[in-house]
Amino acid sequence: AKAIRVREGLAEVIKERCISCGTCVQLCAAKAKLAESDIGIVWQLLGERQPVIALLSAPFPAAFPELRPGQLVTALKKLGFSEVMEDSFGAEPVGREYARLLSENNGKPILSSTCPAVVFYIEKYYPQLIGNLAPIVSPMVAMGRVIKWQYNPQAKVVFIGPCIAKKAESRDEKVAGVVDAVLTFSELKGI
């Protein structure tokens, strides 16, 4: 999205252009750009008395090929998470909503809104297409809502997944408070 400029020899993010995709972090040869980390927030949450639920993104086995799924769950519980859930359970109601939306569709193109970087890109660069975005939350947000609204309202939710853009999604005012912190798989490996 061309959201980096160099000013006085330093690279800086142009917030108005940034879609939170993380490309600048991946491409910066000098490693001068870093994604905002929620590691401190996670440690703080784990140190408090309320339950903290780890919400794992479905492709976690690919990120941790050396571990069986049960081993990762055990490791997360040893870190202090009270429970471990998978966001794919949130994909079921999201999928049902997409099916409903498509069945009621009047022929207007529908753009999937499960990727926050795509949503931010459309909002910033193609605002004329905002009406084509499906008004459906991502599986991460759907599961966060299930956890907070139905399962345990006192629980704190930490999403763990591959995508840096999920950090920005969790802070979006439309869904703020549903997911309390986001760790990338890389951040989790560093803990």
Image: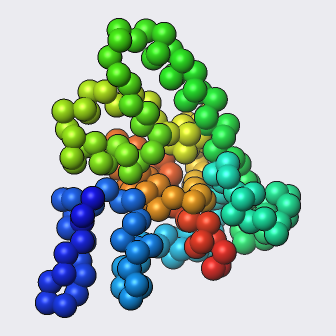
Q: Is 6 located above or below residue 164 in the figure?
A: below
Residue pictured at 61% horizontal, 36% vertical: 90
Query: Which percent across, then down, holds residue 81?
Result: 70, 62
Front-most of residues 80 and 188: 188
Q: Nearest the camera: 124 or 147?
A: 124
**What residue appears at the point 14 percent right and 90 percent down from the top-left corner?**
8
In the figure, is residue 187 to the left or right of 118? right
Q: Could you say where residue 19 lies in the image, as x and y percent from the top left?
A: 31, 56
**Residue 48 in view:** no
Which quadrant: the C terminus? bottom right
* Name of the residue lying farthest toward the left: 8
Residue displayed at 25% across by 32% down: 129
Q: Quadrant location of residue 127?
A: top left
Q: Image check: 4 left or right of 104?
A: left
Number of numbered discs on residues: 0
Q: Is residue 124 left or right of residue 39?
A: left
Closer-to-camera residue (68/149): 68
The image position of residue 25, as x and y in percent, is 41, 73
**Residue at the (35%, 12%) spot, across then down:** 107
Q: Quadrant of the N terminus?
A: bottom left
Relative to residue 76, is residue 86 depicted above or below?
A: above
Q: Is residue 167 left or right of residue 125?
A: right
The vertical placement of 187 against 173, above or below, is below
Residue 188 makes an appearance in the image: yes
Could you say where residue 188 lies in the image, as x and y percent from the top left? Answer: 63, 71
State which quadrant residue 20 falls in: bottom left
Indicate how the structure is coloured in the image.
rainbow
Q: Is residue 156 above or below residue 37?
A: above
Residue placed most toward the observer, 51 or 165 = 165
